Structures are given as structure tokens and as C-alpha cells.
Amino acid sequence: MEDVIIIGGGAAGYYAAIHIAEANPSIKILILERGKEVLTKVKVSGGGRCNVTHAEFDPNELVLNYPRGQKELKGPFNTYCSGDTIGFFDKRGISLKIEEDGRMFPESNSSKTIIDCFVNEATRLGVQLLRNSSVVAIEQLKKSKENASDGWMVESIQKKYYAKKILVATGSNPKIWKMMEKLGHTVVTPVPSLFTFNIKDKRIEGIPGVSTYASVEVLEKSASTKVTIQLKSQVASKVLLASDGPLLITHWGMSGPAILKLSAWGARELNDWSYKFNIRVNWLPEYQEEGLLQLLLQIKDVEGKKTVLRTNAVNIPKRLWINLVKASDISETTKWAEVTKNQLQTLAQQITAGEFQVDGKSTFKEEFVTAGGIDLKEINFKTFESKVQKNLFFAGEVVNIDAITGGFNFQNAWTSGYIAAQAIAG
């Protein structure tokens, strides 16, 4: 019999295994991984660079990046936070660097650095790993003459294994969630969390790769769907969600942090709407429509001889400016002296409050994240142990916790893996 079986050879599973082995070297640890490869999400994270964590060291601020799990993670982050993650890697000779937006990557710019670290550490500490070992059944063993204490039987496609404790770190895995339901747990139905918006619109056509800082609002479909979100104060009753940040125009629509924040916070509502809804974009967030109109009228007085299309009068990318000018019924040859106030009013509106129709979503790179999983009420967040079943622990995205992009989902994996490890090893 093993002391602990960890189901899932991903970020949370490996992190927990290493910390269990360090805290109690006598414990026998077995990781069961369903695939040929381990740490597959680590491999693709950050475009292959691995966005390890985020340079936010205040637990009260860090939790604000979690649409689900915000309240529950406050205690765990006070126990183990981003600084502890940095310390873990530093102790193993891996330096992390902070980028302008706060994301943290290994200095090597390669996820292989992180994968090699985990695999080598687990091997050094005597952790056993079995690949191609998809779990098909989990059963609790009852006390008997042969078995003095409650334990677990975990059956893979290979064979049956027995352990005193199990840690489930399988991420978004419907089969495992069904097994947890059989054990008495409630599973919140999963829906996609990080995704980009599919938009076909002439205003963003032909300019993929253009990126600029913008504010974006998701507009309500009806008054009955009003939801209050802490992202930004609501200035109009029609706004469901609001966000700002870099926005990237893509071949299929819009992406970037401004969009991904909305996809995370609105995961359930947008799923209910079948990903068909309207957004309002302000490409120049420091201005509202009336203020920008006054600026454009001043430019009209100063730049009379120049064409509107070629002037790029405000601080937005030139290709986007050209598309928005055309969308305002201003021709390529129209000079500032000739443009009407009504045309400038339309242009001001296009820049500060242009509405776009979203029709579908696309997965954000390979980083598939879901909202959903084991109900948070059924977990003791001091230990990450199940309140329903003794000696059953959870770590990572298998529970109903998810975050916006930027290294926050990994920090949840490290924190939950560490705290579960301490409880298991104790």
C-alpha cells in the first residue's frame, strides 16, 4: 500500500509530490498520469515560456484576480503566496524575471526549465511516476481486520493500487468529476473561462496584430441579467461587465488582457448567451465622446489643409484610425477643413463608444481554463482536504477556482499543492 497516490501529473500534482517528500521523506508517493507526457500545461503556458506566477505579493490584492475562489483563497495565500513560489525556484537555482505587466517567467524563457526542475526533484526525492495510467475507479476502503484504517483503492487501466490518502490534481477532467460525485461531492458544471471573442466587422478587418490599450464593456442582453462585478464601477445600467487593458486585434476578432478578463469574469453569463452578445469599446479610454469631439474640432481648426485619413490625430494605432475614419463616412480625400461636425461626432463615437457584435469564442492559445469543478463549500481550505471524505485532498483546477490570465492559475496550483502537501505529510 502506498502512503499517498496523486492522481494527475500536472503542475499541482508535481508541486504537491515534491513538498510531501521534502516534509516527510519516509512517505511512499505514487503519481498516476493518464497521458504519455507530464506537465503538459506547463509546457505550453506563456507561449512555451511558462508564466510561473505574478508579481503580486499582497494576498488581499492577489485574490482580486480570481472570479471564482476569491474569498476562499485569502487564507491559503496568507500561508503560501507568490514570494514563496519565487523562493522555491530560487532554492533550486532557477531565477524568475518580472515583465512590465507583472507576469513572471524563468530567465531562460523556456518552460523546459520548469519541467526539468519538477521531474528531477521528484526523481531525486523518490517519487514514483506511472504514465499511461488513466484512472477508471476510486473507492474508499472500509475498516476491517485486514485493513486497520480507512484507505483508498485507485484503479487505473493498468491495475489496482491502494493508498492511505489520495490527492486529486487532474484539472478539468469530466471522468474524475463523475467519480467525485459518486463519493458524495457536488460538481459545479464546468464552462470555458479564458477565451477570445469572435467578431466579424469592417472596423477591425485587415489589421490583425494591432494592439492598443482600450476599455471594453459587455452589454446586457436584457434587464433581468444584471450582475454586479467588482472590475469597474458601472456607469450605465446596460453594462454587465467592464474591463480595461491591452486589446489585440486578431484574424478572428479580439483578444488580449482586456478581453480575457471579461471572458473570465463573465464565463457563466456568456456561456448562457451561447457567446452571442455586444461589446462597447473605447479605444481612447482617457476621453469620453463629448470631450473627444471638442478635441477633433480644435484639430479641424489647426490642420485644415491635411486629409483626415492621413493625420492620425489621436494616440491610437494608425491602421485602426484609418478604419474608424472610413467607418465614419469620411472619404480618403476629405480634408479637415471640409469635414462636418456630424462626421466628427460619428468619429468621436466610433473611437470612444463603438459597439461590436460577438458571435462565438476561440480558445486562448493552448491554455484551456474552465470555471467549474468541486464545490468550494465542500473543501477545508486550511488543508485542501474534502469535508465529505476523510483523507481525500484536492489541488489545482479540479476545484471551482479559476483566474484571469497572467500566472494566477499557476499560483493557485502552487498554493493548493503546497498546503495539501503539508496536511498529507503531517
Image (cartoon, rainbow, N blue to C red):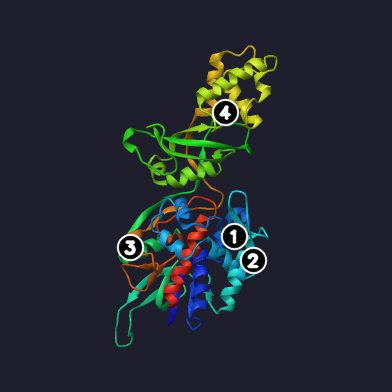
The crowding category of the residue bearing disc 1, from other C-alpha atoms within 10 Å (few below 14, some 14 to 19, many at least 20), is some
Q: Amino acid at mark 2?
A: Ile
Quadrant of res 225: top left
Q: Amino acid at mark 4?
A: Arg
Pick whichever, 293 or 356, lies toward us. Answer: 293
Q: Amino acid at mark 3?
A: Glu
Q: CA distance from mark 4 to mark 2?
A: 45 Å
Pick whichever, 122 or 381, lies toward us. Answer: 381
Check disc 3 and report its element: helix, strand or loop.
Answer: helix
Q: CA distance from mark 2 to mark 3?
A: 36 Å
Q: Which residue is mark 1?
A: 43
Q: Nearer the viewer, mark 3 or mark 1?
A: 3
Check disc 4 and report its element: helix, strand or loop.
Answer: helix
Residue at coordinates 55% horizontally, 14% vertically from top-left?
341
Q: Which residue is mark 4?
A: 203
Q: CA distance from mark 3 to mark 1?
A: 31 Å
Residue 109 image point, x, y percent: 66, 58
The crowding category of the residue bearing disc 3, from other C-alpha atoms within 10 Å (few below 14, some 14 to 19, many at least 20), is some
- Which numbered disc, 2 or 1, marks the residue that appears first in the sequence? 1
Quadrant of res 123: bottom right
Q: Is residue 264 visible?
A: yes
Q: CA distance from mark 4 to mark 3?
A: 48 Å
Q: Which residue is mark 2?
A: 94
Q: Which residue is mark 3?
A: 378
- Asked if marks 2 and 1 touch (Cβ < 8 Å), the reply is no
Q: CA distance from mark 2 to mark 1?
A: 16 Å
Is 90 on the left or on the right of 235, as rendered? right
Check disc 1 and report its element: helix, strand or loop.
Answer: helix
- Which numbered disc, 4 or 2, marks the residue that appears first in the sequence? 2
